[in-house]
Image (cartoon, rainbow, N blue to C red):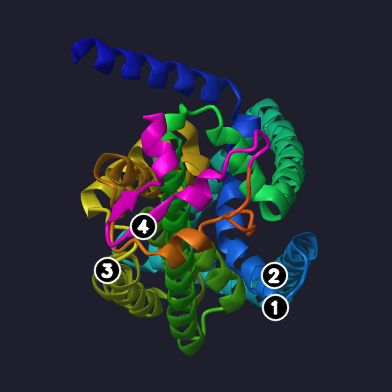
Amino acid sequence: MAWRFLVIVAALYVIGEVIGYLPVVVIPLSVALLLAALLIPAVHRLTRIGLPQPVSAVIVLIGGLGVVGGLLTFVIIQFTEGLPALQQQVSQSLEQIEDWLINGPLHLQQTQIQDAINNGVQFIQENQAAVTSSALTTAGTIGTFLTGFLLTLFILIFFLTSGNQIWTFLIRGVPRNARTRVDVAGRRAFTSLINYVRATAAVAVVDAVLIGAGLWIMGVPLVVPLSTLIFLGAFVPIIGAVVTGAVAVLVALVTNGFLAALVVLAIVVGVMQVEGNVLQPLLLGRSVQLHPLAVVLAITVGLTVAGIPGALLAVPLLAVLNAGIQSLVHGTEPGEGTDADDAESDSGGTDHGGTDSDGEPDAGSRATTTGTTVTTGESDRSEE
């Protein structure tokens, strides 16, 4: 038993080292899988009404890109229009801070404040080389991002159009006596990923709408860009909401003063309480049963190992592993495993009742779920 554990640990270490050397491939692949989990239900609905799978995938992909592009355009326009007012409010806030520093309890002199500003400017000038290097690094990062975006889009097209064929090809490397069980576990894991992405998107929308409404009521500028930032941050559980909420509070503090910032902070904390105690247990509880401690630890490990992409992908990976391992070990799925769920987890949207290239029945056609147990056909038992 001990040597098997050591073999598993060694294999995981090798896989981790390989992934560490190939982040340009691994991150786009993982993001494409998340996007496929988000978009594949729409592809299935279009195929059910009679459209061919490639046509359905193209329609959904173009529609998704159109929605994202339109949202980004709207956010940029709103930010550009609100920037002059933001600059004016920031200037007024800085004047108020300066007045407080001089006339408040600190009783600083104007010369002291000016000296501090001059020291800051001098520090920037002395470290101009580092600033320039950082700018070049940022430019390189933008190039890497564009490359990763194109690769993600390319992979996503194949996931939407032929995901089932890709999965069938992959499980051919599994021994025949375990192929059906691995197939069911993989499809249940993908179903768990679909449920996770759906629930997280719903929670993100609620967070963005409620906090955005509070910002609008308080008269904080840049409501739409801040709401969009909160929406995106909500895809990183716990940490994302805290960071983006802190940005909203900071903007309120700089532009509207201390009292407005306190009110916005109360709104953010209230929304986070609703999310943590109502929305996530209600939406994620049945489909993705993960303890909050496991979520926090997974995010921490992901953030340490791979930065922001690691924090984004840690919880979905944990949810997929949880569902897949439970299915392999117990033949059950966290929550309730149904044939409908397994069918929807088919990332290719094709019929499970086909055959593979070697003439054997496809594993998906042989695997059925009865309650919470997995049964196989007579052919599998004879092979065993």
The magenta stretch spans residue 206: no
Residue to which mark 1 is pinned:
49
Q: CA distance from mark 2 to mark 3?
A: 32 Å
Furthest residue to the left? 1
> In this view of the protein, which residue sits in the foreground, 38 or 204?
38
Q: Which amino acid does the dot numbered 4 rest on?
A: Thr
SS assignment at label 4: strand
Nearest to N terminus: mark 2 or mark 3: 2
Q: CA distance from mark 2 to mark 4?
A: 24 Å
For residue 178, above or below residue 167: above
Residue drawn at (59%, 54%), measured in percent from left and top?
347
Q: Which is closer to the viewer, label 3 or label 4? A: 4
Does the magenta segment cover residue 367?
yes
Mark 3 / mark 4, whichever is N-terminal:
3
Residue contact at pointers 2 and 3, CB within 8 angstroms:
no
What secondary structure is found at the residue carrying circle 1?
loop
Q: Is residue 354 left or right of residue 70?
A: left
Residues under labels 1 and 4: Cα distance?
26 Å
Q: Quadrant of the N terminus?
A: top left
Number of the label disc, if any, that sits on residue 369: 4
Task: Determine the residue located farthest toward the top in the rendered image.
Answer: 3
Which residue is the site of mark 2? 47
Q: Which residue is mark 3?
A: 281
User: Alpha-carbon distance for marks 3 and 1?
Assistant: 34 Å
| Amino acid at the residue labelled 3 | Pro
Distance Cα–Cα, label 3 vs label 4: 26 Å
User: Mark 2 Cα within 10 Å, few/some/many (few <14, many 20+)?
Assistant: some
